[in-house]
Every structure is written in structure tokens, then in C-alpha cells.
Image (cartoon, coloured by chain):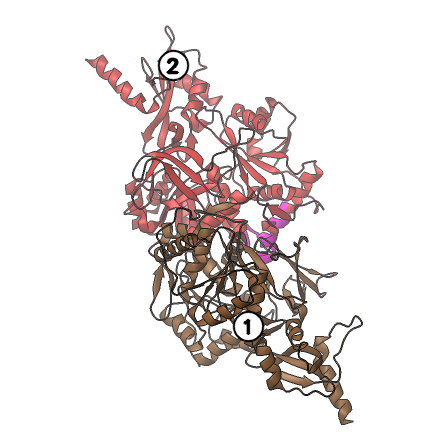
Chain colours: A red, B brown
């Protein structure tokens, strides 16, 4: 039996209508009443334009103070929002539009051309609307008044071993339970204000909108991350929470100089891979309480979190599974490395148009272990995933593209450590006999087909790619194999 | 599809094992680890004693620091806890034991004789265990590791128009969503500590245990309400929240003298009927933030709440429905009085062994209206219910007992205002020709059959009972009819 609740934005309109839902550094502020009215009028236009409950509606838009109303409008219509990464190439977008069976696409004006380009390859007729110029209407009578927690609300793409992206389906319940689990962990205070500087098309950014409408909490929206702006808003706008990745925190601390964060600041929620010990120390010195998290699109944002109080004695840990979530390692016992498996009402039921997930626990593909006290340590991300500036990069996806280059006989991709980005993608290439290849032409080929952050920043020439018995690329061995070849060459 | 979560006490053991779950003014303190271990060992004994998932296990016990472990043990077994009001007469308990199909009864030693007496009338064999001397065992392998939110956890009795009590079934989900809705309203802080001085067999007391295990929050247990003890613990134990009824708050304020409550005190959650304006003013003067609530057993405690910030401009209101709850009045429009109807995941699915509730909204039977801003005003509690010292008293139930007295031809019961108790039950009696009846013998008759708080404190002799066209007693007119008879007699 599906649990239903009153539409959450209607509730905040009723309970906190005059309070701020959204604001930005330029002084724009939107109350819950404004947000509700705008969302309803957009939803009414969507209905007038033929969008129906259950339709898949894609969004290709940068963060903007107007975007949340469109995402809430989807919930008033009962449609499904397909959130596209704006950094994808038109080809990648085409794939997702087709795969997700999208019937309508809302694009920001800066992304209009990319949207039109992507639409050319679509296998069905897709209505494209410009977000900024979309008309509003008076309340339609068919707006949803309740939310059924089992209904699908959003789809976001993630890639797997095969390098072929698949759409994670999130129900309203996934988002609800994620917000509640986070609130039970971090507490909920009357003056909380969350700064949003992550893309809303990623679950880390989107989940802040969910917390806002579920807690009745204002969001301070910084459309484009800028350390100086973020630091300033912590003081001036009395921001209490920020979600970020390590590279952002490093920039904030560098920009901060010797200043401390004010005492009202409660939480720096840090995702996207382990936090370097030195960065953690710098943050502590500046009165920035860092909560290190582990999570993924499939878990609707963080599923385990390490509190600041445990940070120093559990360096490198991602903490414990939140209330209502469960986490275990598929290994013989504590201390043993195995696949990390998770369960809970925030975990997705599966991917769109893919075979259903039937196991009790969701297999993350990541490897890790729990120490004697049950703290999780992630030792290896799934599928040799590279995390570059907070974006997940899947080597298989890049290898697939590169293998289409006529100059390339064999290719392997892995992450190379980088002080600024954490990791950058590096390509190891066996060039075909008689052919030539340089980094510039490799990058040019990729740029047409891949998001910029996925384009390899390094090219290494090798005689062979290390593989295991079943011919699978041993990506972790690419660097050592290169070194071995070089050593042999020199000797 | 039922949502499952890890067993909540297991989670708190994992997340906050070393932190206090329960404490009392005598310095007893129980960590979440202690509570978890004790609950598991009691559950293991229950399994060894043949108690099985789905069994109905009754509790007849005063508040005590050991009681929560038994209630959590029930959840490890998957049984259903039937919580009996300790003030009921043996006859009333017998009815509930039979009606709830109870197979086993845990009684506190002070209530042992009452339990044995009640068991005599039971229509099935009921195993009776003494709470204090119940043995503990090592962990049993069949303890539940997960909680399914759709499963029934508790049953608590309430009476209706007919005067015949029925068992409200609460699922784990009802309790979960009630705790979450309250947390979203009041906020959740790291140093929250809730004082429990209401009976745990009522939902108002039981819900504090649920908040404790869901938030990971300590409960300060005051077994028997004493204003001086409660006030002292607010200071000494740094209590932040108290659930109470008006009569308790009045005593706390009287005992407080001219002292103020400390600034760490966040919330006086007041249920059980409207709060007198003068009391509210006294509370404000003493820095006691009063949250006035409306709720009932069927809504798993409060479903609407008035915040202190609105208290002075909305005197007499019970506020608005909490997040995830919905409330409407069955009337033509705002300002019009009608039946109060509620909906939400904290609202019961129905009563045990009674026809299912099929309407979308639960009809409370209470009358009220919403003002232009949507604030609820309860104008008349259902079924002419009397609220005496926070206990619900149903006139029909008392009338049914009194009508069995051979001296009584006709009887009507209503509440009489009382400065100490709010209301006390008053009986209006038409004595049979040739018979005599005094208050003492009426009370003696009732005491054998009814809980003490239901026994009429006043007896008025009348010539007739006011009734409507369909012969229903007009309880609200009992006093004016009496006055009319007296006036006629004098003229």
C-alpha cells in the first residue's frame, strides 16, 4: 500500500508561506508562497501544452533561481523529470533523450543550441521549450494535491561497467527518506539555510531542493561555484550548511586566508570521494565542521556519513549508514574487503527500461570494509570510476569512444592524480601500425562526442594494454605497465 | 509495497550506542546499547516462552524505567503490544483482553492482583507474567532485524459514541511518521531531552519513546507526575521538551513561583483540550514556550499544532496540520463549523476486529472550524467527550453502567467545569419511583466497574433527561434543563 502525503510544497505554502524558500547573492528572494504559485502556474501551462501525468520531461539547464519552480511543477503534473547533465555532448544527450523516452525538453537559453542539436538524433518527436520564456497560466484544475511516495519523480543518468549510461529512477519516497535520514543525522534547526552550489541535475544538488521543501528551509543559490562568493555568503546570508566536493572546499579554504567560519555555520557536507587528511585539518582549524559522506545517484545522495566528532580518529572513513539505511560489506567479516551493499527507503528500485533489481541489497560495485566499530572505508570505487572535480567519469565510456578512432588499436583509460581536480582522465593508447596520433587530435575527436570533463587530459603511448585472463582491461595496472615498458626501453 | 527500514533500536545501538536513551531523577541511566541488549534478551525470553510474531501481548504497567525494554522487545519479536490503561477496573480490562484476543499479559507487580482479577473473566487462556521478575535470555536467532512500516505494532483502546471501547491499531509507520512530523515542526537538536510524565499506555506518552528511538534522543522519565520534580529536572537534567496537559502545566507554574524556565527549554507540548488564556499568559511570562496541540489515539498523538509565535494572536486555536498530515473541516467554507477530518501516514488504518475505515479522511467526530488563515479551532469534542485531567471520559460509557443500577430510571452524564481537573464527570439521574439513591452508593457501584477517573463526582436529581427527536440524550443541555426544573420548582 503506497503511502500518500499532502503535496509538500502546498504544505510549506500553508505552514510557512511567507518565509524564504530560495534566495541568491544578488538579493533575489522567493517565498514558499511565491514558489508555490509559480510552480502551479508552470504546471498549469504544462497541462495546457499536453504534458500528462507519467510523461518523461527532460531538463537541460544550468542552476538558476527559476529552475526549482519547473522541477516542482513536474510534481504538480505527476510527470517525471529527466535531469540532463549540461556538460554532456549533443550525442550523449541524444542517447539519453531516446533511452529515457522523453517527450518534451525544457532547455535554458544558454543551452538552446545544444538542445536543438541533440534533438536532431532523437527517435521520436520531442517538443522543446525555452525555460526562460515559458509562459505561465492560471491554476489548472488537474494539479496534484497529494504525493504518492511510490511514484517516480526524477530520473538521473549514471554509467556502469559497460560505459553505457542508464537512468536511475527516484521515487518521491526515495527523496523523502533521504531528506529525513539526513535531517535525523544533522538535526533540523529553525534558522538552517543551505547553500546550493552543486548542479541541480546531480542528486547532490537536487537533494538540497528536496530538503528545502520537506523541512521548510531556505536555500541560498550560488549558480556558479566561486569560493569568494560562497565564503562571503556564509557570513552575509548566514548560511549554515554547504554541500560540496573536496576541490571546492580546498578553494574556499585557500580564499579564506586566516579567517575562520562563523559559529552559526553547522555543516560542510562533503561528497565525491575521500577527503585528504591535510584538507580536513585545514577545515578544522578554520572552524568548518566537515561531514564526509558516501553515496551515489542510486541512493538519492548520501547514505553514510562521518561526523566531525569522529573525523580525526577515523581518517579516510565514510562513517556509518544513516538512520533507516543499512549497509553491509560482502565479505567474511569486519576488516575484510568486499563489495559494499546498501538497503533502505532512499535506495532506488532500479533503472528505467532495464531488468529490475531483485536483490534485497543494492550492490554498489564499490569495494570497502568496515572496521571493528562498524565504520565504513571505501577502498575502490566501482568500475574503476574516476572522480574528477566531483563528476563521475567512467573509463569504459571513454574507451568505447576512443576505440572508434582509426589510429587506435587498443586503449585503456584510468585516473591520474591531480592536485586541482583530484583525478583527471588519462588515455593509454596502442597506436596502429603506420598511424600517428597526438593529444590534440585525440581531444578533438572526444570533444565532439563526450562532455568536456570526460575528455582525456593526458595521452600515453604503450606497446600493450594489461589485461586479465578474461581479456578485461586492468586499468589499475596501466601506470605500472607503462613504467615497466619504459624501464625495459631504457635498459 | 511496504517500506522496510533496519530495526530502529539496532540503528541507535550502531549510531549512538554509548549515549543515554533513558534516565530518571534518581540518577538511573540507560544507554542505547543497554536498552538494545535488554530488549533483545527480553524478546529472546518471549520467544522461548512461545510468544510469536503477530501475537497480541497486553501490558498492564505503571511508567517505569524497565517498561520501554519490554515494548521494544515486542518489536524484536514482531508481536503486537496491547497497552492497557492501569486505571481501568478489572471488568473493563477483561473486556479489552477478550476484545483484543490477547494471549499473554505482562503486569507490573503493583497491578498483579488487578491482572489476576481481570483474567478470571477472560474467554481464553492468558499467560500472565510479572514484569519485574521476568527472566532474560541470550540472543535468540529469530529476532527481527528489520521493521516493516505497514506492520501493526501497538493497540490502544478508545471509546466511541456507543460507550464500547475499541482498539486503535498503530503500525510502525504511524509511529514513524508521527515522530518525523513532530520533528519537522519542532526541529531536532543534538541536545534535546524529552521529559516523559504521561502514561506510556496513552499515545501521548508512548510517542515520546518513539521519538527517542527514531531521533536517538534521551528520555527523562518521571514515573509519577510531580510539579516540583519536573521543574527541578528541567534545570538539573537540562530537559528541553515536556509533553503535558493543562492541569500539569498549571501545577508546574504554581510550583515555580516567580522563577523562569531556563533558555535551553524549547517546548511544552500541550495536549488534551484547549489551554485557558490566563495559563498561556503565565507560561509566556515564565519563558515556557507552549505548543498547543490537537490529536487523538487514532492520529498517533498530535496531528496539528499551534506554535508559540502564533499563540497570542490565535487564542484558542490548535494551529495547523503538521507536515505530511492533512486536515479539513466538513463544512461549506472557512469559518463554518463542521466535523474535523484528518489524513496522513500517522493516521490509523482502523480498529481491531471492527469494520475497516474506508473513507479517504478519518472522521474525528470532533467539531471545529478553520479561520481565514487556515488555523483550526476545535469547538466541540466528539461524543460529548469529557476531558478530566488529560484522560478522555466518554459519557455513554458511564451512562451504560449507571443504567444497570436498579434505582435509576434514566441517566445522562456530562462534564462539569472544575478548576483543578478541567472537567469532572457529573451524573443527572431520574430516580425510579419508590427508590432512593445517593452519591456514595452511586460511586460505589461505579468503582467496581469503572476506572476511578470515570466515576461521577457529582449527582443531580432531575425529573427528566433532555432528549432530541430521535431520543438521543442532549448532554449539553443537562445543566440548563436542571436549572429550568429548579426555576419552575421555586415559582
Regarding mark 1 in the picture, which secondary structure is present there?
Answer: loop
Q: Nearer the viewer, residue A167 or A46?
A: A167
Q: Which percent across, then down, holds residue A334?
A: 31, 40
Q: Which percent across, then down, holds residue A471?
A: 37, 16
Q: Nearer the viewer, residue B133 or A5?
A: B133
Question: What chain does badge 1 belong to?
Answer: B
Quadrant showing the N terminus of chain A = top right
Q: Is residue A45 magenta?
A: no
Report the Cα–Cα distance between label 1 and label 2.
85 Å
Q: Are marks 1 and 2 on the same chain?
A: no
The residue labelled by disc 1 is: B89
Q: Report whether residue B423 is seen.
A: no
User: Which quadrant of the view contains residue B68?
Assistant: bottom left
The residue labelled by disc 2 is: A410
**In the drawing, what numbered circle is on residue A488?**
none
Question: What chain does badge 2 belong to?
Answer: A
Quadrant showing the C terminus of chain A = top left
Residue that lies at the very extreme toward the top in this rendered image: A434
Q: Which percent across, then down, holds residue A319?
A: 35, 45
| Left or right of A18, for residue B162 | right
Residue that lies at the very extreme toward the right in this rendered image: B469
- Magenta segment range? A11-39
Amino acid at each position: 500500500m503506497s503511502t500518500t502525503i499532502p503535496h509538500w510544497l502546498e504544505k510549506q505554502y500553508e505552514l510557512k508561506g511567507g518565509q524564504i524558500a530560495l534566495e541568491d547573492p544578488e538579493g533575489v528572494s522567493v517565498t514558499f508562497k511565491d514558489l508555490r504559485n509559480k510552480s502551479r502556474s508552470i504546471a498549469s501551462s504544462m497541462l495546457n501544452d499536453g504534458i500528462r501525468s507519467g510523461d518523461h520531461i527532460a531538463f537541460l539547464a544550468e542552476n538558476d533561481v527559476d529552475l526549482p519552480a519547473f522541477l516542482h511543477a513536474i510534481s504538480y503534473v505527476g510527470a517525471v523529470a529527466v535531469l540532463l547533465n549540461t556538460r554532456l555532448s549533443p550525442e550523449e544527450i541524444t542517447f539519453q533523450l531516446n533511452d529515457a523516452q522523453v517527450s518534451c525538453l525544457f532547455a535554458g537559453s544558454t543551452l538552446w543550441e545544444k538542445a536543438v542539436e541533440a534533438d536532431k538524433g532523437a527517435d521520436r518527436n520531442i517538443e522543446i521549450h525555452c525555460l526562460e520564456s515559458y509562459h505561465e497560466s492560471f491554476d489548472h484544475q488537474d494539479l496534484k494535491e497529494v504525493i504518492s511516495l511510490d511514484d517516480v519523480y526524477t530520473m538521473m543518468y549514471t554509467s556502469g561497467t559497460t560505459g553505457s549510461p542508464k537512468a536511475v529512477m527516484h521515487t518521491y519516497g526515495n527523496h523523502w527518506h533521504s531528506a529525513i535520514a539526513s535531517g535525523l543525522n544533522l538535526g533540523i534547526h529553525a534558522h538552517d539555510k543551505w547553500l546550493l552550489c552543486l548542479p541541480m541535475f546531480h542528486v547532490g544538488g537536487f537533494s538540497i531542493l528536496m530538503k528545502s521543501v520537506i523541512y521548510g528551509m531556505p536555500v541560498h543559490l550560488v549558480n556558479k561555484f566561486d569560493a569568494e562568493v560562497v565564503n562571503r555568503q556564509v557570513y552575509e546570508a548566514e548560511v549554515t550548511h554547504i554541500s560540496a566536493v573536496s576541490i571546492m572546499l580546498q578553494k574556499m579554504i585557500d580564499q579564506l586566508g586566516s579567517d575562520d567560519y562563523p559559529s552559526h555555520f553547522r555543516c560542510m557536507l562533503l561528497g565525491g570521494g575521500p577527503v585528504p587528511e591535510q584538507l580536513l585539518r585545514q577545515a578544522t582549524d578554520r572552524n568548518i565542521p566537515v561531514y564526509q559522506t558516501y553515496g551515489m545517484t542510486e541512493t538519492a545522495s548520501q547514505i553514510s556519513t562521518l561526523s566531525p566528532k569522529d573525523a580525526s580518529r577515523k581518517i579516510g572513513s565514510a562513517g556509518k549508514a544513516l538512520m533507516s539505511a543499512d549497509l553491509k560489506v560482502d565479505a567474511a567479516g569486519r576488516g575484510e574487503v568486499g563489495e559494499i551493499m546498501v538497503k533502505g527507503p532512499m535506495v532506488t528500485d532500479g533503472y528505467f527500461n532495464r531488468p529490475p533489481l531483485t536483490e534485497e541489497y543494492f550492490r554498489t560495485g564499490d569495494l570497502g570494509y568496515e572496521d571493528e566499530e562498524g565504520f565504513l572505508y571505501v577502498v575502490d570505487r566501482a568500475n574503476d570510476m574516476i572522480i574528477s572535480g566531483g563528476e563521475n567519469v567512467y573509463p569504459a565510456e571513454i574507451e568505447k569512444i576512443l576505440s572508434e578512432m582509426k589510429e587506435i588499436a587498443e586503449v585503456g583509460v584510468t585516473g591520474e592524480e591531480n592536485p586541482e581536480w583530484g583525478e583527471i582522465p588519462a588515455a593509454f593508447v596502442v597506436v596502429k601500425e603506420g598511424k600517428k596520433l597526438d593529444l590534440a587530435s585525440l581531444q578533438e575527436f572526444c570533444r565532439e562526442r563526450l562532455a568536456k570533463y570526460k575528455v582525456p587530459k593526458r595521452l600515453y603511448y604503450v606497446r600493450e594494454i594489461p589485461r586479465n585472463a578474461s581479456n578485461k582491461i586492468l586499468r589499475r595496472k596501466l601506470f605500472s605497465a607503462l613504467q615497466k615498458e619504459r624501464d625495459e626501453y631504457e635498459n
